[in-house]
Amino acid sequence: FDVMQLRFDAILCDPPYGLRAGGRRSGTKNPIKVPPQYYDNHVPRTQCYDTRDIMFDLLQFVAKYLRMDGRFVYLLPATIDFEAKKDLPTHPCLRLVANSEQQCQGIFRRRLITMEKCAEFN
């Protein structure tokens, strides 16, 4: 049962890469129970969010909530030696439509990736 009956025509994003501030997510490996009197002022702990985990979770979300033939567009950091077959995150429900490169400074590049949903998420 899918609680969120959402389906998007397109999803556009610029995910955190961990190059500057680094990706973080709420939670901790050893959660503690917060007493009710502290709920209003409580700020949840965070933990590091590895770039591979970010991309895995993002592609899972996209595969689940994008309608068939919908587009997913995102920016991906890269270097001059980027190889799509090796470095481009993939998902069985998504096919690559476009992969454009923007030169930044020195060996650094940024890639604009466009994917299309081609199979239903199970």
Image (cartoon, rainbow, N blue to C red):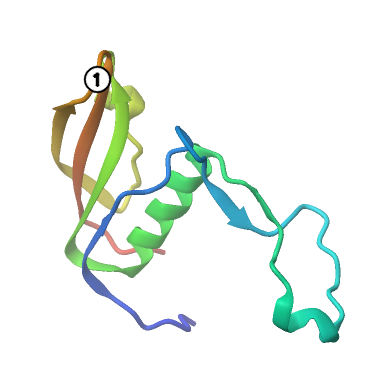
Q: Residue pushed farthest front? A: 41
User: Quarter of the image holding residue 113?
Assistant: top left
Residue visible at 33% across and 48% down in the picture: 92
Q: Mark 1 points at which residue?
A: 105
Q: Residue at x 85, y 65 (%)?
A: 32
x and y percent of residue 69 in the render? Answer: 15, 62
- Residue 84 point in image, percent of width and height: 26, 26
- Between 79 and 72, the one nearer to me in the picture: 79
Residue 93 shown left or right of residue 122 in the figure: left
Which amino acid does the dot numbered 1 rest on?
Gln
User: Residue 94, percent across and down?
Assistant: 26, 50
Q: Is residue 67 above or below residue 86?
A: below
Q: How many labels does the image show?
A: 1
Relative horizontal placement of residue 30, taking residue 4 as reference (left or right): right
Q: Can residue 87 be seen in this view?
A: yes
Q: Tag 1's secondary structure? A: loop
Left/right of residue 12 with respect to residue 24 in the rendered view: left
> What's the residue at 34%, 60% (across, down)?
62
